[in-house]
Image (spheres, helix red, strand yellow):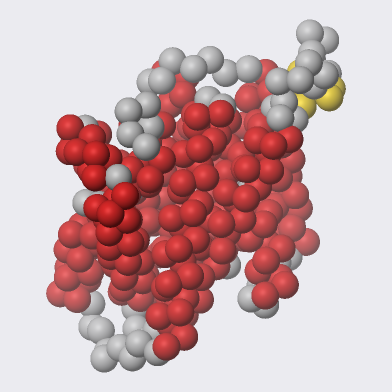
Amino acid sequence: MWIGFTLLAAFMQAWRNALQSKLSQDVSITGVTLARFIAAGPIAALYLAILYQTHSVPKLSFSNTFYLYIAQASLMQIIATALMVKLFTLKNYAVGAGLAKSEAIVAAVFGLMFFGVQLTALGWAGVAVGALAVMVLSGAFKLNSASRLSNESKGSYSWSTVLLGLACGSAFALTSLSVREASLQLQGPYMVRAAWVLLLVISSQTLILVSYLLLKQRQTLVKLWRNKQLTLAVSVTSCIGSIGWFSAMTLESVPLVKTLGQIEVFFMLLIGRYWLKQPNTKSDVLGLLLIAVAALLVIWG
Protein backbone atom coordinates (compact mmCIF):
# COMPACT_ATOMS: atom_id res chain seq x y z
CA MET A 1 0.00 0.00 0.00
CA TRP A 2 2.77 2.45 0.84
CA ILE A 3 4.29 1.95 -2.63
CA GLY A 4 0.98 2.76 -4.32
CA PHE A 5 0.45 5.87 -2.19
CA THR A 6 4.03 7.01 -2.88
CA LEU A 7 3.64 6.66 -6.66
CA LEU A 8 0.37 8.63 -6.55
CA ALA A 9 2.04 11.33 -4.46
CA ALA A 10 5.07 11.57 -6.75
CA PHE A 11 2.91 11.92 -9.87
CA MET A 12 0.67 14.61 -8.37
CA GLN A 13 3.61 16.48 -6.84
CA ALA A 14 5.39 16.61 -10.18
CA TRP A 15 2.34 18.36 -11.67
CA ARG A 16 1.99 20.62 -8.65
CA ASN A 17 5.61 21.73 -8.96
CA ALA A 18 5.17 22.42 -12.67
CA LEU A 19 2.04 24.48 -11.99
CA GLN A 20 3.82 26.37 -9.21
CA SER A 21 6.71 27.07 -11.56
CA LYS A 22 4.27 28.57 -14.05
CA LEU A 23 2.44 30.58 -11.36
CA SER A 24 5.74 31.97 -10.04
CA GLN A 25 6.13 33.94 -13.27
CA ASP A 26 3.36 36.30 -12.14
CA VAL A 27 3.01 35.83 -8.35
CA SER A 28 5.45 36.36 -5.47
CA ILE A 29 7.14 33.47 -3.65
CA THR A 30 4.79 33.84 -0.67
CA GLY A 31 1.76 33.87 -2.94
CA VAL A 32 2.86 30.74 -4.80
CA THR A 33 3.47 29.06 -1.45
CA LEU A 34 -0.09 29.94 -0.35
CA ALA A 35 -1.50 28.62 -3.64
CA ARG A 36 -0.41 25.17 -2.50
CA PHE A 37 -2.73 25.30 0.53
CA ILE A 38 -5.48 27.87 -0.05
CA ALA A 39 -8.08 25.54 -1.61
CA ALA A 40 -6.73 22.28 -0.20
CA GLY A 41 -8.40 22.61 3.22
CA PRO A 42 -11.99 21.92 2.06
CA ILE A 43 -10.75 18.94 -0.01
CA ALA A 44 -8.91 17.53 3.00
CA ALA A 45 -12.01 18.05 5.20
CA LEU A 46 -14.23 16.26 2.65
CA TYR A 47 -11.73 13.39 2.42
CA LEU A 48 -11.71 13.01 6.22
CA ALA A 49 -15.52 13.06 6.36
CA ILE A 50 -15.70 10.30 3.74
CA LEU A 51 -13.23 8.19 5.74
CA TYR A 52 -15.40 8.56 8.86
CA GLN A 53 -18.35 7.22 6.86
CA THR A 54 -16.42 4.24 5.49
CA HIS A 55 -14.25 3.25 8.48
CA SER A 56 -14.84 2.32 12.08
CA VAL A 57 -12.95 5.05 13.94
CA PRO A 58 -12.34 4.98 17.71
CA LYS A 59 -12.43 8.16 19.76
CA LEU A 60 -9.15 9.95 19.10
CA SER A 61 -7.00 11.67 21.70
CA PHE A 62 -4.95 14.68 20.56
CA SER A 63 -1.96 15.23 22.87
CA ASN A 64 0.26 18.29 23.23
CA THR A 65 3.04 16.31 21.54
CA PHE A 66 0.75 15.73 18.56
CA TYR A 67 0.06 19.46 18.20
CA LEU A 68 3.78 20.21 18.54
CA TYR A 69 4.54 17.96 15.58
CA ILE A 70 1.68 19.57 13.62
CA ALA A 71 3.13 23.04 14.25
CA GLN A 72 6.63 21.90 13.29
CA ALA A 73 5.41 20.24 10.09
CA SER A 74 3.36 23.31 9.14
CA LEU A 75 6.23 25.77 9.52
CA MET A 76 8.84 23.54 7.88
CA GLN A 77 6.64 22.89 4.85
CA ILE A 78 6.01 26.61 4.37
CA ILE A 79 9.76 27.27 4.48
CA ALA A 80 10.52 24.33 2.18
CA THR A 81 7.92 25.37 -0.40
CA ALA A 82 9.18 28.96 -0.42
CA LEU A 83 12.76 27.77 -0.95
CA MET A 84 11.69 25.48 -3.79
CA VAL A 85 9.84 28.32 -5.54
CA LYS A 86 13.04 30.35 -5.17
CA LEU A 87 14.92 27.49 -6.86
CA PHE A 88 12.52 27.71 -9.81
CA THR A 89 13.70 31.29 -10.37
CA LEU A 90 17.36 30.22 -10.43
CA LYS A 91 17.16 27.02 -12.49
CA ASN A 92 14.65 25.39 -14.77
CA TYR A 93 11.71 23.50 -13.34
CA ALA A 94 13.17 19.97 -13.43
CA VAL A 95 16.53 20.99 -11.96
CA GLY A 96 14.97 23.13 -9.24
CA ALA A 97 12.60 20.40 -8.14
CA GLY A 98 15.38 17.81 -8.52
CA LEU A 99 17.59 19.70 -6.07
CA ALA A 100 14.74 19.65 -3.55
CA LYS A 101 14.81 15.83 -3.76
CA SER A 102 17.92 15.89 -1.56
CA GLU A 103 15.18 15.42 1.05
CA ALA A 104 15.59 11.62 0.92
CA ILE A 105 19.21 11.53 2.10
CA VAL A 106 18.59 14.27 4.69
CA ALA A 107 15.54 12.38 5.97
CA ALA A 108 17.65 9.25 6.37
CA VAL A 109 20.31 11.08 8.37
CA PHE A 110 17.85 13.06 10.53
CA GLY A 111 15.71 9.97 11.02
CA LEU A 112 18.69 8.00 12.30
CA MET A 113 19.91 10.83 14.56
CA PHE A 114 16.65 12.09 16.07
CA PHE A 115 13.77 9.70 15.33
CA GLY A 116 15.22 6.20 15.75
CA VAL A 117 14.68 5.24 12.09
CA GLN A 118 16.56 2.11 10.98
CA LEU A 119 17.25 1.09 7.37
CA THR A 120 18.56 -2.11 5.84
CA ALA A 121 21.83 -2.12 3.88
CA LEU A 122 19.87 -2.10 0.60
CA GLY A 123 17.76 0.77 1.88
CA TRP A 124 20.86 2.83 2.65
CA ALA A 125 22.29 1.92 -0.76
CA GLY A 126 19.10 3.23 -2.37
CA VAL A 127 19.37 6.48 -0.42
CA ALA A 128 23.01 6.89 -1.49
CA VAL A 129 22.23 6.25 -5.16
CA GLY A 130 19.31 8.67 -4.92
CA ALA A 131 21.64 11.32 -3.50
CA LEU A 132 24.05 10.78 -6.41
CA ALA A 133 21.12 11.12 -8.83
CA VAL A 134 20.19 14.46 -7.28
CA MET A 135 23.78 15.71 -7.74
CA VAL A 136 23.78 14.64 -11.39
CA LEU A 137 20.43 16.28 -12.04
CA SER A 138 21.52 19.46 -10.27
CA GLY A 139 24.38 19.94 -12.74
CA ALA A 140 27.25 19.11 -10.40
CA PHE A 141 28.44 16.75 -13.12
CA LYS A 142 27.67 16.50 -16.79
CA LEU A 143 28.38 14.14 -19.65
CA ASN A 144 30.96 15.46 -22.10
CA SER A 145 31.00 14.75 -25.81
CA ALA A 146 32.69 11.41 -25.18
CA SER A 147 29.82 10.47 -22.84
CA ARG A 148 32.08 10.31 -19.79
CA LEU A 149 31.18 11.80 -16.42
CA SER A 150 33.30 14.86 -15.64
CA ASN A 151 33.29 17.84 -13.32
CA GLU A 152 31.67 20.86 -14.89
CA SER A 153 34.25 23.59 -15.35
CA LYS A 154 32.47 26.45 -17.06
CA GLY A 155 30.95 28.04 -13.99
CA SER A 156 27.26 27.40 -14.70
CA TYR A 157 27.13 25.10 -11.70
CA SER A 158 26.55 27.15 -8.55
CA TRP A 159 27.28 25.85 -5.08
CA SER A 160 25.01 28.55 -3.66
CA THR A 161 22.16 27.02 -5.66
CA VAL A 162 23.02 23.54 -4.36
CA LEU A 163 23.12 24.84 -0.77
CA LEU A 164 19.71 26.38 -1.33
CA GLY A 165 18.54 23.01 -2.62
CA LEU A 166 19.94 21.23 0.44
CA ALA A 167 18.22 23.74 2.73
CA CYS A 168 14.98 23.10 0.85
CA GLY A 169 15.45 19.34 1.10
CA SER A 170 16.24 19.59 4.81
CA ALA A 171 13.05 21.56 5.47
CA PHE A 172 11.02 19.02 3.50
CA ALA A 173 12.71 16.18 5.43
CA LEU A 174 11.80 17.75 8.79
CA THR A 175 8.25 18.20 7.48
CA SER A 176 7.97 14.54 6.54
CA LEU A 177 9.48 13.26 9.77
CA SER A 178 7.17 15.51 11.81
CA VAL A 179 4.13 14.32 9.82
CA ARG A 180 4.98 10.68 10.51
CA GLU A 181 5.54 11.31 14.22
CA ALA A 182 2.26 13.24 14.48
CA SER A 183 0.38 10.40 12.81
CA LEU A 184 1.94 7.84 15.14
CA GLN A 185 0.58 9.79 18.14
CA LEU A 186 -2.99 8.84 17.12
CA GLN A 187 -4.93 5.58 17.25
CA GLY A 188 -7.19 4.15 14.58
CA PRO A 189 -7.03 3.34 10.84
CA TYR A 190 -3.87 4.68 9.19
CA MET A 191 -5.81 6.59 6.52
CA VAL A 192 -7.85 8.42 9.17
CA ARG A 193 -4.73 9.30 11.17
CA ALA A 194 -3.01 10.61 8.04
CA ALA A 195 -6.13 12.58 7.06
CA TRP A 196 -6.33 14.31 10.45
CA VAL A 197 -2.68 15.33 10.19
CA LEU A 198 -3.22 16.57 6.63
CA LEU A 199 -6.26 18.67 7.56
CA LEU A 200 -4.63 20.30 10.59
CA VAL A 201 -1.35 21.01 8.79
CA ILE A 202 -3.08 22.56 5.76
CA SER A 203 -5.43 24.63 7.95
CA SER A 204 -2.50 25.98 9.99
CA GLN A 205 -0.51 26.86 6.89
CA THR A 206 -3.44 28.62 5.23
CA LEU A 207 -4.14 30.69 8.35
CA ILE A 208 -0.48 31.71 8.70
CA LEU A 209 0.02 32.69 5.06
CA VAL A 210 -3.32 34.47 4.54
CA SER A 211 -2.74 36.50 7.72
CA TYR A 212 0.74 37.49 6.55
CA LEU A 213 -0.42 38.50 3.07
CA LEU A 214 -3.34 40.52 4.44
CA LEU A 215 -0.87 42.48 6.54
CA LYS A 216 2.04 42.77 4.13
CA GLN A 217 1.14 41.84 0.52
CA ARG A 218 -2.56 42.31 -0.21
CA GLN A 219 -1.81 42.75 -3.90
CA THR A 220 -0.53 39.16 -3.96
CA LEU A 221 -3.99 37.91 -2.96
CA VAL A 222 -5.42 39.91 -5.88
CA LYS A 223 -2.94 38.25 -8.27
CA LEU A 224 -3.88 34.80 -6.96
CA TRP A 225 -7.53 35.63 -7.70
CA ARG A 226 -6.63 36.77 -11.20
CA ASN A 227 -4.85 33.42 -11.67
CA LYS A 228 -7.62 31.49 -9.88
CA GLN A 229 -7.70 28.54 -12.30
CA LEU A 230 -3.96 27.97 -11.97
CA THR A 231 -4.13 28.56 -8.21
CA LEU A 232 -6.93 25.99 -7.88
CA ALA A 233 -4.97 23.48 -9.94
CA VAL A 234 -1.95 23.92 -7.66
CA SER A 235 -4.12 23.36 -4.56
CA VAL A 236 -5.91 20.29 -5.92
CA THR A 237 -2.76 18.52 -7.11
CA SER A 238 -1.03 19.46 -3.86
CA CYS A 239 -3.83 18.07 -1.69
CA ILE A 240 -4.05 14.77 -3.59
CA GLY A 241 -0.27 14.48 -3.45
CA SER A 242 -0.28 15.18 0.29
CA ILE A 243 -2.91 12.47 0.84
CA GLY A 244 -0.52 10.07 -0.85
CA TRP A 245 2.56 11.25 1.07
CA PHE A 246 0.88 11.37 4.47
CA SER A 247 -0.68 7.92 4.03
CA ALA A 248 2.59 6.38 2.82
CA MET A 249 4.58 7.93 5.67
CA THR A 250 2.05 6.63 8.19
CA LEU A 251 2.72 3.12 6.88
CA GLU A 252 6.48 3.19 6.24
CA SER A 253 9.62 5.05 7.36
CA VAL A 254 10.21 8.45 5.77
CA PRO A 255 13.63 7.73 4.17
CA LEU A 256 12.21 4.75 2.26
CA VAL A 257 9.07 6.63 1.17
CA LYS A 258 11.05 9.66 0.04
CA THR A 259 13.69 7.64 -1.79
CA LEU A 260 11.06 5.72 -3.74
CA GLY A 261 9.32 9.07 -4.20
CA GLN A 262 12.27 10.27 -6.25
CA ILE A 263 10.56 8.51 -9.14
CA GLU A 264 8.89 11.92 -9.28
CA VAL A 265 11.96 13.09 -11.20
CA PHE A 266 10.90 10.83 -14.07
CA PHE A 267 7.52 12.59 -14.19
CA MET A 268 9.22 15.99 -13.84
CA LEU A 269 11.47 15.40 -16.83
CA LEU A 270 8.51 14.35 -18.99
CA ILE A 271 6.44 17.35 -17.91
CA GLY A 272 9.39 19.71 -18.36
CA ARG A 273 10.11 18.31 -21.82
CA TYR A 274 6.60 18.06 -23.27
CA TRP A 275 4.52 20.63 -21.32
CA LEU A 276 7.00 23.34 -20.30
CA LYS A 277 9.13 22.74 -23.42
CA GLN A 278 12.40 22.49 -21.46
CA PRO A 279 14.86 20.08 -23.17
CA ASN A 280 16.58 17.25 -21.30
CA THR A 281 20.35 16.68 -21.33
CA LYS A 282 22.40 13.47 -21.12
CA SER A 283 22.90 14.22 -17.44
CA ASP A 284 19.12 14.29 -17.01
CA VAL A 285 18.86 10.84 -18.56
CA LEU A 286 21.68 9.49 -16.36
CA GLY A 287 20.03 10.99 -13.30
CA LEU A 288 16.75 9.35 -14.29
CA LEU A 289 18.40 5.93 -14.54
CA LEU A 290 19.99 6.40 -11.12
CA ILE A 291 16.60 7.34 -9.68
CA ALA A 292 15.16 4.09 -11.06
CA VAL A 293 18.03 2.09 -9.48
CA ALA A 294 17.51 3.87 -6.15
CA ALA A 295 13.78 3.08 -6.22
CA LEU A 296 14.43 -0.62 -6.92
CA LEU A 297 16.99 -0.85 -4.09
CA VAL A 298 14.50 0.69 -1.67
CA ILE A 299 11.74 -1.72 -2.70
CA TRP A 300 14.05 -4.75 -2.42
CA GLY A 301 15.37 -3.46 0.91
Asked whether the viewer can see residue 27, the reply is yes
> Which residue is found at the position 49% from the left and 54% from the top?
79
The reply, left or right, for residue 21 in relation to residue 87 is left
Residue closest to the far front: 216
Residue in front for this viewpoint, 111 or 187: 111
Q: Residue at x 43, y 55 (%)?
A: 78
The residue closer to the viewer here, 166 or 285, is 166
- Which quarter of the rendered picture does the C terminus lie within? bottom right
- Counting from the top left corner in percent of width and height, residue 133 is at 69, 37
Report x, y in % for residue 15: 38, 36
How many numbered callouts? 0
Residue 258, placed above or below residue 49: above
**In screen coordinates, is 133 left or right of 175?**
right
Residue 244, image quadrant: bottom left
Q: Residue furthest top?
A: 145
- Give the residue displayed 50% in from the left and 29% down from the top: 89
Q: Is residue 87 left or right of residue 63?
A: right
Residue 6 position (above or below residue 175): above
Identify whether 107 is placed above or below 266: below
The picture places residue 141, in percent across and down from the top left corner, at: 77, 27
Q: Give the quadrant of residue 189.
A: bottom left
Task: Classify 90 as above or below 154.
Answer: below
- In screen coordinates, is 86 left or right of 220? right
Point out the image quarter for the N terminus: bottom left
Looking at the picture, how far across and down is residue 57, in whole percent?
Answer: 25, 84
Res. 224 visible in picture? no
Residue drawn at the location 43% of the way across and 26% of the way down:
271
Which of the two residues, 201 or 206, is positioned nearer the viewer here?
206
